Amino acid sequence: MKRQSINQRVDILIIGGGPAGLLAASELSNYDCKICVVESMPTLGRKFLMAGKSGLNITTSKTNFLNDYGESKEWIAPLIKNYGPSEIIEFCESLGQGVFFGSSNKVFPISMKTSPLLRAWVARLRRSGVDIQTSMKWIDFNNNINSHPKIGRLSHVVKSGDKDYCIISNATVLALGGASWPRLGSDGKWFNILQKYLGNSKKMLVPFSSANMGLKINWSRQMLKFEGLPVKSIALKVNGEFKKGEFIVSKSGVEGGLIYFLSTMQLEKVTSFEVDLLPNFSITAVYKKLCQPRGKSTMTNFLRKSLGVTGVKFGLLREFGYPFPKTPLELAKIIKNLEVKIDGYYSMDYAISTRGGVSKEAVNAELMLYNLPGVFCAGEMLDWTAPTGGGLLTGCFSTGSHVGKSIAKYLNLKLLN
Ligand SMILES: Cc1cc2nc3c(=O)[nH]c(=O)nc-3n(C[C@H](O)[C@H](O)[C@H](O)COP(=O)(O)OP(=O)(O)OC[C@H]3O[C@@H](n4cnc5c(N)ncnc54)[C@H](O)[C@@H]3O)c2cc1C
């Protein structure tokens, strides 16, 4: 790498313009400091915008949601207690984006979309003096410029077009995202860069894997006519317990809330899953209905009239329960416990999120890398996961806020009046 001149000096460099990086910027904008955000894509928050495409589930109103963070609960729960659902709602409202409480404890901005929120957020950051540079990719730390307290502690190479620049900072936030949907900017390429500084140990950098992903099913032609339809008011077995909700039949399998919950929370690898098609009826109630005389009705009509099993629900039953058993009890058992065989997983490129990344072992309580003093990590690039339903963005906001406050202490920044 050729020796470079310093193009910019800032107090804090934030790399990655997703929700985690922008929240760190918001926290730090309360202090007297020079902040620069660099984002590799031409615009900010592309994955955040994608999250709002079918309704931005920004946080949750579930009371026991901290359990959804699994093994990471221990370290992330205190952060979420400091900046969690109420703070997120307050933040949205402060940007003129009121929220509403949807079904299954989901919280959405009234507009349902990301764009009005993001627009107002970026405008506020710019007004408070945060320098935001897009189409600027962080390439590496710059070892050719010696760190010095007078010029700044950390030096970085960033690329814009075919030109390299050098940015010096006193502290840096890495908020580079996970590795799903790489075309939106979070391509996980930072993993190899950090490996040079953290080493090859999986204890420090955990390889990425998909979370919140769809499951592949090679549907029959009959089933494909239900493509895009939700399978509503069902329950799905996750770690031995049935959870109520719904999922969607897609061209190549199943996706949606309950499926993401299963693929994120299930402790063992999934090769099939069990569905209760009528969770509001006991098996005895289903059995009794099935004991009624069927007369000349076809099975389709009989199940529709006796139990309301129709449309996509009936399709699913036929797909995995056919040939139907002769006795009402055996059929009732299948309706209450239908085994849906899966043929694989959606690839990481189409997963909602990834697990893996910077391990908690690599950072201290302030989320600063032990091996790179002054460099803090936030958001999905840290190794934690949660089922979507607001849990992911809540984790990103809370780690972003934590890192912002940690840096203010680390650099002894003065609060603005
Ligand atoms: C289809 C979809 C739907 C979703 N729906 C929801 C939902 O409803 N609720 C929910 O809670 N979560 C949802 N999520 C997940 C949520 O969007 C992410 O968890 C969140 O965006 C992660 O935030 P982040 O800031 O950590 O990373 P990101 O949003 O991924 O941002 C990281 C940024 O860093 C930039 N970057 C990467 N490398 C470099 C580099 N070298 N130099 C400069 N910049 C770089 C990237 O371009 C990117 O903009 C959804 C995700 C998807 C894909």
Image (tube, grey):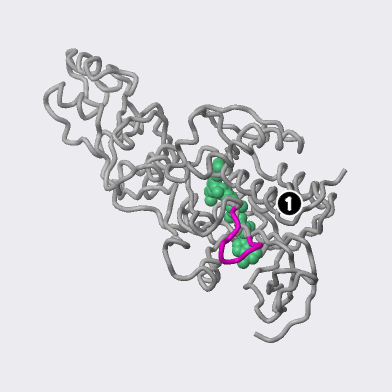
Q: Judging from the image, what secondary structure is the residue with disc 1 in?
A: helix
Q: Where is residue 152 in the image (x, y as percent from the top left)?
A: 76, 69
User: Is residue 47 visible in the rendered structure shown here?
Assistant: no
Q: Quadrant of residue 390?
A: top right
> Which residue occupies the extreme right position in the image?
417
- Relative depth, front residue between 191 and 335: 191
204 left or right, relative to 299: right
The image shows residue 358, relative to residue 399, as above or below, that is: below
User: Is residue 26 visible in the rendered structure shown here?
Assistant: yes
Q: Where is residue 223 in the image (x, y as percent from the top left)?
A: 32, 41
The number of numbered badges drawn on the structure is: 1
Q: Quadrant of the N terminus?
A: bottom right
Q: Quadrant of the C terminus?
A: top right
Q: Name the residue located 70 percent from the left edge and 68 percent from the top edge.
A: 136
Q: Position of residue 299 (x, y in %)?
A: 22, 25
Segment tinted magenta in the rendering: 367-375
Q: Quadrant of residue 377?
A: bottom right
176 left or right, relative to 308: right
Residue holding disc 1: 408
- Magenta-colored stretch includes residue 21: no
- Magenta-colored stretch includes residue 371: yes
